[in-house]
Image (spheres, helix red, strand yellow):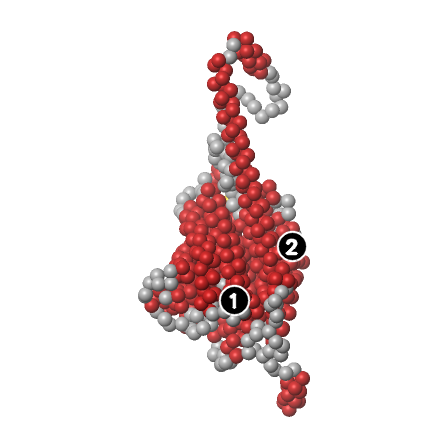
Amino acid sequence: MKHTALFITFFALLIFKVQAQTVPNPEIGQWWSSPGIIGTALLIALVSFVAILIIGSRLSALLHHLKNKSESRNKESLRSEMVNWDDEDLDWVLEKRKAAKTYQLSGKELSGQTPSEDSLGLITKVNHDPENPLVNEKKRETLHLDTPQPLRSLMIWYLGASVFWLVFGTLVGQYVGMKFIWPELDQISWLSFGRLRPVHTNTVFWGWASLTMVGLGYFVISRTSNTSIFSYSIAKIAWILMNSAVLLGNFLLMSGVNNGGGEYREYIWPVALLFAVGMILTFYNYYKTVADRKISEIYISNWYLLGGLAWTITLVIIGYLPSYQDGLGETVIQGYYMHQGVGMWFMTFTLGLVYYYLPTSLNTPIYSYSLGVLAFWTQMLFYTMIGTHHFVFSPLPWWLQTVAIVFSAGMLIPVIAGTTNFLMTMKGSGSAISKSYVLPFFLVGVVFYFVGSAQGSLQAFRLTNFLWHFTDFNVAHSHMTMYGIITFILWACIYAILPKITGKEPPALGVGIHFWLAFIGLFAYMVSLMAGGTLRGISWIEGEPFINSVILMQPYWVWRAVGGSLMLVSHLVFAYNFYQMAKKGNVDPAKVTSQSFQLTPNQPDHV
């Protein structure tokens, strides 16, 4: 048997020549006509169209507001002119007013002579200036979910820590971005670009996004399983381990102790082990909670949450075992680890959150359970083989690069299935978007889910890879996905659940400022680096001196800093909004309606 296997392997190697590159580099004379370039341009145009629609609706409201003010001024002018009217004109007006006073109602209108009273607690706020043209007065959340105090506290601890890491990580990222404009900003080794850049990425990955996902996931598995969390003690231990890993890992990175050149795995293995143990404990806690469920069905969100945890635990083990990471083996593992971390952890887990928080925010079932299952299994199938598309035209075997490109194109299946499911669930909710804290963030997240994922598939093609790889275009793509998809959706979920479990509303103006600064900042950041990255790639291909590409990027790096600054300010506003929702205080029972009942897979969380 052994000899047969060796013979088959040898014969296969004779047929499939293991060569890094069997064809010459692509011609870029007509690069703008490439399907990948055209597709990316159309996707960016789609984002621009959505931005124009959102901004246009706000401008329309502003113009309507200014028109009403103009009409009000005309009425005031008319009143002032009445002082100079003749007696006959005044008598005519008085007669009209007297006739109006004698008008009798039919008795069916909502009116009366008794003093106004709100015994049912229907009125929560009186606003004498309801027409806010730029930030609508949001509809207050009147539903209070009966949530056990330990679960509420656990969520606030996870989310509170994640908000801290978001602000810290963004501060570091902003400082790193400023170094592109002022390279000699400092001469301190701890603050060098090479040390701070992984601090920024690992903080927002493992500190902000991961802790937020786990905290939000605890509510989902408890609610959809109609049972309590298996062990709060395990959840607290996992919280300590994960935060300790981020804190210790960042300290070591800034002091120059790291895992080498492995992107997103710069933490040395003892630090990564702390985080991995925290994830193992979280998976066990999730699994036992779902296993102890009080209903027969396993809601689709739990498939994504448990799948994301299981795949990521496997990924961390593979990414840190050293035995097969020599030479090109390390390159293959790096591509696998880097892309799987984004797709099988952040994307998979976040999609699981969407399948719960989006339908409950709309008070409607998810559009299609079958589409969700299709997206789940096809994501598992295609995402496992696409990491090597980061190393096209590298010394890796040509066939392995081709497999990665083919599977990258296959990722359009789960992306289209998921996007269709979410948009059809949101169908008919356009009028509610201006009255909700949550839906604008979900809308942007879903649009970027399609745009960012589809653009990644197009970027895997050989010509687009040849043009864009190793340029600033990749930085724009990573922010399009990790920020436009993951972060916006996590914000939506936080705004969806915290007011329901704490009874505390965020300030409407604060939510509006947060949304607009983050959205405009991301757009400026993304478009500037995409444009600059394209020009930089052309400069390299044409053989120009490297310093030329640095000089041409200067204006685009300025716009990067502008966009990053807007994003940083939005995060500070979000931190304030979170504090307003999470701070201690009694909930007024007259302003909320408590609900607690069993959730079935096709039933929204409130009716």
The reply to whether residue 322 is visible in this rendering is: yes
User: In this figure, which residue is indicated by the disc labeled 1?
Assistant: 539
Query: Is residue 54 positioned above or below 280 on the image?
Result: above
> In which quadrant will I find the C terminus?
top right
Residue 276 visible in the snapshot: no
Location of residue 528 in the rendering, given as x and y in whole percent from the top left corner: 50, 57
Q: Which residue is mark 2?
A: 420
Q: Earlier in the sequence, mark 1 or mark 2?
A: 2
Percent x, y of residue 594:
52, 43
Q: Secondary structure at mark 1?
A: helix
Out of 221 and 383, give the one closest to the viewer. Answer: 383
Query: Residue drawn 52% across and 45% down?
Result: 437
**Which numbered disc, 1 or 2, marks the residue closer to the eye?**
1
**Left or right placement of residue 589 versus residue 109 in this view:** left
Dot 1, how many residues are within 10 Å of its Cα: few (below 14), some (14-19), or many (20+)?
Answer: some
Discs 1, 2 touching: Cβ within 8 Å: no
- What secondary structure is marked by label 2? helix
